[in-house]
Every structure is written in C-alpha cells, then in structure tokens.
Amino acid sequence: MTAVLSRLALSHFRSHRRTVLDFDGRPVAMWGPNGAGKTNLAEAVSLLSPGRGLRRAAAEDLVRRPEALGWKIVATLAGHEVETWAEAGQARALRVDGKAATQTSLAALARVLWLVPSMDRLWIEGAEGRRRFLDRMTLSFFPGHAEAALDYERAMRERNRLLKDMVRDAHWYGALEAQMGAAGEAIVRNRAAAIARLAYAVANADTAFPAPDLSLTHPDRDLPQDAAALTAALAESRPRDLAAGRTLVGPHRADLDAVWAAKGVAARDCSTGEQKALLISLILANARALAAVEGEVPILILDEVSAHLDAQRRARLYDEIVALGAQAFLTGTGPELFEELGARAQYVEVAEEGGVSIATERPAP
C-alpha cells in the first residue's frame, strides 16, 4: 500500500499566503531560487506526521509575517481530510475527517520520512541529533514509541528537579525511577528492533548508496536492557547524579554509531559526500523496511538532496524512489536537477513575488 498526499492547501503558512496543489501519487519535484518557499512546502508535508516537522518549529514560528493571523494546513492524506492549524498565540490543533485528533493518530494514516540539509552534519555533531534521527525512524515502525519517549522524559524531568534541589530521600525517587525503567525498556527495545529492520533492509537491497552498519552506544556503561535493570541502575547512580544535577544513565544518553561497511570507516571520519550518501542509504532502507514489514510505502521528503549528487547517482536515486513506489517530495534550485525523472514525476516551480511564495505546476523539463 502506498500512502498518497493528493491535495495540500496552505493559508498564511510561512511565506505562503495561499497555496493549493493537487498530486497524483508520483514523485513531486519542486524547484526555485533560494528563499522562494520550497522548503516551506516540504515542511508543511512533514507536519502531516506526529511531531514538530522537519524544522522542529514551534507553532508561532510557522505563521506568515507580517500579518501574524495564524496559519492553517488542509490536506487530503490517504483518503482522509487532515486539518492542522494554530491561531495567533495558540497551540497547534488537529482534526481528521472533521473530528479533533491527536498527533499520534497521523501515524495511522501515513508514515513520513525526511532528509534535510541540516542533517548533513549529523555524524560529526552531538549525540542528541543522532538520537532524534534514530527515534524518527523508530517511530515510523512503532507509533507507540512516541508515548514511551514522552513518559520517560516527563519522569526524568521530575527526577532532575529533585537532583538539582539536592533531595536525598530515596522515597522521592523510587516511583519516578520505576516509571523511567518501564518506559526506558520500551525505548531500548523499539530502537533495537528498528536497527535490526534497517540492517535487514540494507543487506537485501540493490542500491547505489553505501551500506551502513549501525549500533547503539552509551557513554558510561552498557545500557540496561530491561525495566528492572534500568530502575536499579538509576538507583545506583543517584550519588553521581546528585553531584551532576542531572540523570547520567539511561536511553537519553545513548548514541547512534554508523560505519561504512565496505570500507570499515566510521561515518564521522567519512568525507562530506560519503556522509550524505550514508544518510540517503538509511532513509531508503527505512522506506524499504516499512514497505516489506508494514506493507506501507512511506511519503519521502528529500530537501535539496539532488544538489549533492552527480547525474549518475541522481538517476539511481530517482530509479530507487520510483521502484519503491514512493511519493517523494524533492526540492532543488533548478529543473535540470530532475531531468533524469522525466515523465515519472510532477513538477512545481516555486517563485517569490512581493514577499509571497507562488507555486505553479509545470510540465516535465
């Protein structure tokens, strides 16, 4: 089954005052100069999945300036009408088929995966970004992963508050550590299962992109795998955590390591181009694994990905996307970056006129 976004309508969203586009399920190539509003369209698509989208923006940051009237996205997604919006100064709201809904319900309609330029430094910057990257992939397989992560974070915030206040009474910590242990076990289990699925998809793919070996590490010790062991590790770590004023053991400290399998080179030591190729490989593996295991082909968002590839590798990427049957939203600065797609895609030119983004469907280049 292929999830399809068939209509996207934006109102006062970022640089788009009013934009309506219809799609037929083919990949969508969007081009235009820098700052025209291509990524804003991609961001709108990303907000049709749980979370804060590809920029992790707060609701108030999505409003078009200077009007600041609030914003709205209306989409037809997998045959359902999805509306998400925020009035000025208000939190984001969501309706599916006219009924109020939670963001987690979006995962039941379609899975959305993305790769954006800000991820290019993923392998050489802090572990937080790599955990977020892994958790987005994990969430695509296990929608309940979001609830486990929220439960863990809530309990950890309370525990950290006790640590900062130098509370030493063990009774204050017991219930919180038990909650963290239960949620942490689910997080560890889901991440491990996601990595296993990705590894299988990588090993069984005919692809032009390098195969990564993935593993999870912890800066302090082997990460406990079950609720009881994690709860015990948290209790044992209290004296050290009190000195630090924060929790030093748990899945929130895990890191994702990747090695280019064929070369035996860690991702952090690869060239910029090789690091990008590894990221593309993982996104494609995630999509293939979802298609094989869940029977669902996800929507892909690949922002400015073509600019980093030569013509031959661009053609192979497009061939893989089409073979997968994915509806992919690709952005670039010019139509020449999508020539290898030919009639297999829809084309949208995005231009800026008087501070307003204008999106116009065009014939194949």
Image (cartoon, rainbow, N blue to C red):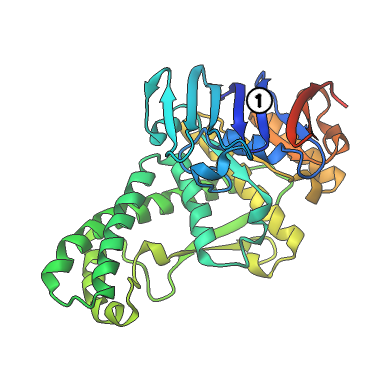
Q: Nearer the viewer, residue 142 or 94?
A: 94
Please, is residue 118 above or below residue 243 in the view?
above
The number of discs equals 1
Q: Residue 355 in the image: x percent, y percent? A: 75, 37
Rendered location of residue 146, percent (x, y) = 38, 45
Seen in the picture, residue 167 relative to 346 is either above or below; the reply is: below
- Report the side of 55 relative to 245 (left or right): right
Nearer to me, 251 or 31: 31
Image height of 136 relative to 68, above or below = below
Asked where in the image residue 76 lies, by quadrant, the reply is top right
62 versus 272 height, above or below: above
Query: Which residue is at 55% across, 23% downward?
Result: 75
Residue wearing tag 1: 18
Q: Quadrant of the C terminus?
A: top right
| Residue 358 placement, left or right of 152 | right
Residue at image coords 75%, 28%:
358
User: Which residue occupies the extreme front position in the image?
Assistant: 67
Q: Amino acid at mark 1?
A: Arg
Q: Looking at the picture, tell me which residue is in the foreground, 137 or 63.
A: 63
Label 1 neighbour load within 10 Å: few <14, some 14-19, many 20+: some
**Residue 299 seen in this snapshot:** no
Residue 154 lies in quadrant: bottom left
Tell whether 324 sits left or right of 184.
right
Give SS at disc 1: strand
Name the spot of residue 36 as percent of width and height, x first.
76, 39
- Describe residue 76's horizontal placement relative to residue 194 as left or right: right
Which residue is depicted at the point 34% across and 66% down?
A: 250
